[in-house]
Image (cartoon, rainbow, N blue to C red):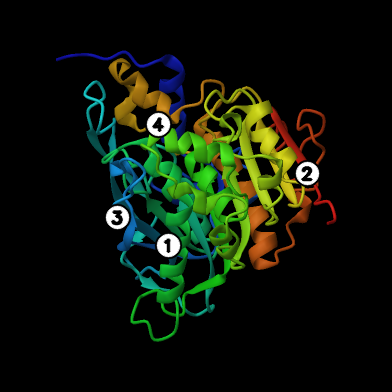
Amino acid sequence: MKRYKVHSAVLCCLLVLASNLSGAQAQHEFFLFGDALPNAPELSWRGEYSVGVRTMEFVNKNQVDVLNSKDGVDPYYDRTLKVEVWYPAFVPTGEKEIVTYSQVMGLSNNPKRPLIPFTFNGRALRDATPNLTAGAFPLVIVSHGYPGSRLIFTYLTENLASKGYVVVSIDHAESTFRDLAGFPSTLLNRSLDQLFILDQIAALGKTGSNSFLSGLVDSNNTALVGYSMGGYGVLNAAGAGYSAQLTTQFGSMTGGSKAIEIRTTNHQAYKASYDKRIKAVVAFAPWGMERGVWDAEGLKGLKVPTFFIAGNQDDISGYDKGIKAIYTGAIYADRYLLTYDNARHNTAPNPPPAESLKPSLIDEYNFYAEPAWSEYHINNINQHFVTAFLGILLKKKDYQKYLDLNENSNEKNWTGFKPRSSVGLELLHALPVKN
């Protein structure tokens, strides 16, 4: 039988997580992604609602097929988008709030990284009856990176649903592990997909829609959450127009296509697409600033309150000239920047799956893992701050004390954190300038 060596630090972490945990965690038979560690900050714990989950599929017809553009001519096709929806639900007595998710590692377009199926469990009940007793819940739309999956943030999506949100995570066509294709599709379609799904969920949430979402969704209170290329998309969907430089770069990649012009700062179609239903944005490691995606004028268009999350060693999106430069340049937005000291790009996803612990799968392990941080701890911190930020804006919760903190967590323990646990973090806050 072939044997694999597992790094001692990883083995130690797994043994700790498999052990019995104190407090509310002791009610669970086993530890899952998203469960609160003993040192988890206060708002990371699950909320009062049981969680249901369903898979849905939507077709956005007659979209530009930029991967087949030629000589400046754009063909059209129908984009199929699969989404996962988590929502407050009723779990019948005797049933367990457990679901099995099916995922893959690897890249569909890279023979050196073949697709490897794996499964993992979450705390939700498949197709559970929606809980309509509290009225409609705010909507949160979640967008993955390139590549990625709608299931890569279950620690956060389930957690938010338990706190009274309807959470919809998108599989962006031509950008997932299973169907990875050319980058121009992702450049063009991220914000378009997000706004399309917002419209679809809003329609299904209306009374009489014959959907399980009818009466469950308050789409007028919507937050967009995106990671990497998802972060690139949500900033654009919320008002940060792309630069003319991106139009030029896009054309050079696509045989002259100008399709992305409709998402640039001064285009009339872009100005008309501004959606007042979007009340908050969370952008994990948003990509593009170092590549000229935004300029000062484009960033001025972001006026929605925004919470940025980054690692100051991010080698994909960049930090000082990347994510932090977006934070600095979005002068008309009330904005925060949470920084993990010595973290790179992986500040948003679930922890590495157990199947990735083999030395031969280092590329798959590194897609999830942070070299200087426990991903489990990062997940709990993210749950805490996203809960505070969205709670203030979408639920009018009295959570401001969790954001009114000294900038450097090493100087004084942050409110909501266990003693000695808020280290290696920085939180910046900038108020919008007046027009």
Task: State the residue in front, 146 or 51.
Answer: 146
Quarter of the image with the C terminus in it: bottom right
Residue 142, compared with residue 1, is above or below; it is below
Residue 144, compared with residue 142, is above or below; it is above
Task: State the residue in front, 54 or 178.
Answer: 178
Q: Which mark is residue 64?
A: none
Neighbour tally class for label 1: few under 14, some 14-19, many 20 plus, Cα within 10 Å: many
Q: Which mark is residue 197?
A: 1
Return the residue at label 3.
Answer: 76
* Amino acid marked by disc 3: Tyr
First in residue order: circle 2 vs circle 1: 1
Left or right: residue 25 compared with residue 200: right
- Percent x, y for residue 154? 43, 48
Q: Residue at x 33, y 40 (%)?
A: 71
Q: CA distance from mark 2 to mark 4?
A: 31 Å
First in residue order: circle 1 vs circle 3: 3
Return the residue at label 4.
Answer: 352
- Percent x, y for residue 152? 40, 43
* Amino acid marked by disc 1: Ile
Q: Quadrant of residue 343?
A: top right
Task: State the residue in front, 5 or 228.
Answer: 228
Count of marks overlaid on the render: 4
* Amino acid marked by disc 4: Pro
Residue extending farthest to the right is 434
Q: CA distance from mark 2 to mark 1?
A: 30 Å
Question: Which element carries disc 3, helix, strand or loop?
Answer: strand
